[in-house]
Image (tube, rainbow, N blue to C red):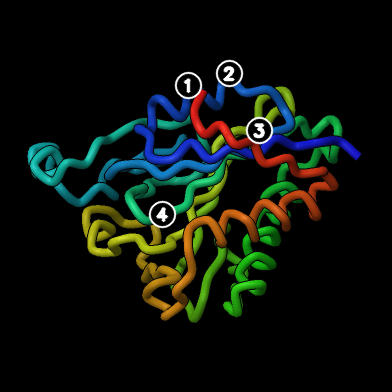
Amino acid sequence: MRSCEVRDLGRMGWAEAWRIQRETPPDSLLFVEHPHTITLGRNAHRENILAAPEILDRAGIAVHEANRGGDVTYHGPGQIVGYPILDLNRWRRDVHLYVRTLEEVIIRALDDLGVRGERSSLNSGVWVGGAKLCAIGVHISRWITSHGFALNHETDLDYFRYIVPCGLSAPVTSLARLGVRVSREAVLDRIAGRFGQLFELEVQVLENAHS
C-alpha cells in the first residue's frame, strides 16, 4: 500500500498555500485554514462577487483567481480546507470518480461525527438538509491533483453574503450551525482516516506543520 503524508499547515494565506501545493510531491494531503479570502475558479462569473472591491478591502477579504474548477468560493477562519496532491496514474484516471470519492471521504467523516451528509445530483460538494456544508473544486494536470475541498467547521457564515457561493442561490451551513461541537483536530483525524481508506493509502501524519 502506498503511503500518504498528511500535514496541517495551520493559518496561511491562499497564495502561500498554492505555492506549497505546487511544490508538494504526490501522494500528500495538506490541511489549511485561510484568512478571509474569495477565490474564483476557471468558470467563475465575477458578478457572483456581490461587493465592490473597496468594500471587500475594508472587510479584510483578499481575492484570488484559481485554476480549479467551479465558480466563486469563500474561505476563512473556522473552515477546514483540504488540498490532496495525488497521482491518479497510481489510482484511477477518472476525474468524475475522483470528485465523487472526495465527496465520499467527507460524507463518511461526517458520519463518524454523527452528521448525515448528502450529495446533490446537480452540483458537487456535500450537503445537509439542502444547505451546502462542504464545497469541492479541483484541478488535474497530467493526472496530478491540486485544490480540493472546503468544509465549514466553525466558519462565520455571514461572510458568504459577499458572494453567490459556487454560483448557486442555495444556503450554506457549518458543523457549528448544525450544533456539532467538535475540535478541529478531531475533524482532521476523521477526514484523514477516511481519505486513506477510500484512496487506498497508508496515512502518515507529520508533526511539522509548516514547510
Circle 1 residues within 10 Å: few <14, some 14–19, many ≥20: few
User: Closer to the N terminus: mark 4 or mark 3?
Assistant: 4
Q: Amino acid at mark 3?
A: Ile
Q: Position of residue 63 (x, y in %)?
A: 27, 35
Q: CA distance from mark 4 to mark 3?
A: 19 Å
Numbered mark located on residue 23 in the image: 2
Q: Amino acid at mark 1?
A: Arg
Q: CA distance from mark 2 to mark 4?
A: 23 Å
- The quadrant holding residue 30 is top right
- The quadrant holding residue 2 is top right
User: Closer to the N terminus: mark 4 or mark 1?
Assistant: 1
Circle 3 is placed at which residue position?
85
Q: Disc 4 vs disc 3: Cβ atoms closer than 8 Å?
A: no
At a point 49% along the width and 28% down the height, the residue shown is: 210
At a point 25% along the width and 36% down the height, the residue shown is: 62
Q: In the visual, does 194 lie left or right of 3? A: left
Q: Give above or below for 92 relative to 89.
A: below
Q: Position of residue 141 (x, y in %)?
A: 66, 25
At a point 81% along the width and 36% down the height, the residue shown is: 3
Circle 4 is placed at which residue position?
79
Q: Position of residue 198 (x, y in %)?
A: 79, 54
Q: Give above or below for 62 relative to 117.
A: above
Residue at disc 1, secondary structure: helix
Q: Amino acid at mark 2?
A: Glu
User: Closer to the N terminus: mark 2 or mark 4?
Assistant: 2
Q: CA distance from mark 1 to mark 3?
A: 13 Å
Circle 1 is placed at which residue position?
19
